[in-house]
Image (cartoon, rainbow, N blue to C red):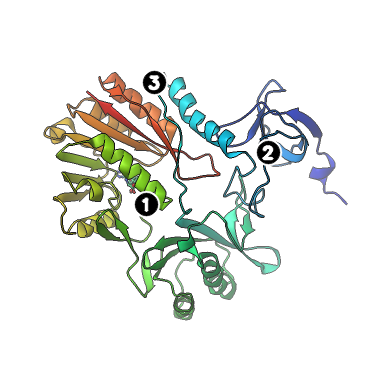
Amino acid sequence: MPNSSWAHAVVERLTIDHVGHRGDGVSLDAREPVYVPYALPGETVEVEHVAGNHPDRRHLLAVEVASPERVTPFCKHFGLCGGCAIQHWRSEAYSAWKRNIVVETLRQAGLECEVAPLIDAHGAGRRRITLHGRLGTHEVLKVGFAAMNSHDVIPIDRCPILDPGLAGAIEAAWALSEPLMKRMAATKPLDIQVTATDTGLDVDVRGSGPLPAPIVAALSEVAEQHRLARLTRHGELVLQRAAPSLRMGGAEVVLPPGSFLQATVAGEETLAALVQERIGRAKEIVDLFCGVGPFALRLAEKARVAAFDSDAGAIAALAKAAHAPGLKPIKAEARDLFRRPLVAQEMRDVDAVVFDPPRQGAQAQALKLAASRVPTIVAVSCNPATFARDARLLVDGGYGIETVVPVDQFRHTPHVELVARFAR
Ligand SMILES: C[S@@+](CC[C@H](N)C(=O)[O-])C[C@H]1O[C@@H](n2cnc3c(N)ncnc32)[C@H](O)[C@@H]1O
């Protein structure tokens, strides 16, 4: 017997015009755009509206006329798991679409500049994942990624886009979720972040709240059995078998739990190389939103660096790694750059600034940079829209913008990074 929401579902036939910035097929058949996940340009599709979904979204029922660019997804979880939005599109069309997200966003912001071809930086795959643990119906444990546009967890046993360094990560997440979710009958969702490091898996579990000693002991046991480098809960140490570290340039960084890390090794290396090229021969460099220092530690091979980030753990890790032999001095300081951006006076003797803010961008800092006399500014961004807003401030402040380079480290998703140089 269909439930009432299905009984009233209206099936429609739509043609797809293009793929939108979030990876959905977009139909322009009606007065307002209609979004159909997993549909491609030129396709005729049968869709329905699912009760509870946004009125402009449809669920794909069938592809009646398929695009010649459609390919078979390589993952059995694709279409349910929300981790990937696009595995069903030929790679050339996908790359052109992703580059075009940057082109269109800059054009809409009135920024006139070249956009280079997309650089693929998937490399060996993702080195960090966040899996979710939930108790489903009949208290059945589910560990996996969130479904698309929903908090439902799609249980997974494998993910083909992971770096081989994450081997065992999914099994470890299931094993850690067992004592937490079952023995405690936890109603809270768990988030299990796993990072592949040079010394093994680094796992941070969030969402479990305070735990009785036997459960913590059970977690330690799982960490031993799965040979984790480190297990933390909300950043607090449960067990460490080896300090989880990563090589960045010539230095070794011991990762603080939960600090930011570029998604792939290739992504970090590509972005760092693009930054180094654009910084040129600068001798005094400021690295804003530096994280644990993937740019600072490489730039310090040739220049003095002052690095800033609000994450005190990341700054402490960078300060320690900065003692590596052969590096010029790195001054690392914890500072909230939204509230207290560096001002022109502080950048008076600086040859170049690199800034790589979170998705919100760096509006307050960009305003101060626009008023500075720094000759070279290199922006790294994971959000073309906030980049365009901040770039506009720099251009209005008299900086010229050079070719923008889009970088794809989140293959199969709508996320895109970019690097751009500004000069005066
Ligand atoms: C996109 S990450 C880049 C980190 C680093 N450049 C890298 O490549 O690993 C953004 C960084 O901004 C930092 N951040 C977020 N909000 C901040 C704020 N208000 N002030 C300073 N840093 C902030 C985060 O801690 C994070 O390290």
| Residue 207 seen anywhere in this rendered image of the structure | no
> Which amino acid type is marked by label 1?
Phe
Instruction: State the separation of the CA atoms marked 1 and 3.
Output: 29 Å
Number of the front mark, 1 or 3: 3
Residue nearest the viewer, comparing 256 with 196: 196
Residue nearest the viewer, comparing 207 with 240: 240
| Residue 221 seen anywhere in this rendered image of the structure | yes
Which residue bears the numbered disc 1?
260
- Does 13 appear above or below 287? above
Residue 392 location, quadrant: top left
Which residue bears the numbered disc 3?
111
Instruction: State the separation of the CA atoms marked 3 and 2.
Output: 33 Å
Q: Estimate how packed mark 3 is, as few (under 14), some (14 to 19) or many (20 or more) residues with alpha carbons within 10 Å.
A: some
Please say if the residues under marks 1 and 3 sit with CB atoms less than 8 Å apart.
no
Helix, strand or loop status at disc 3:
loop
Q: Residue at x 30, y 52 (%)?
A: 311
Residue nearest the viewer, comparing 282 with 193: 282
Q: Is mark 1 within 8 Å of ligand 1?
A: yes
Percent across and percent down for residue 159 are 57, 58
Helix, strand or loop status at disc 2:
loop
Instruction: State the separation of the CA atoms marked 1 and 2.
Output: 35 Å
Q: Residue furthest left?
A: 349
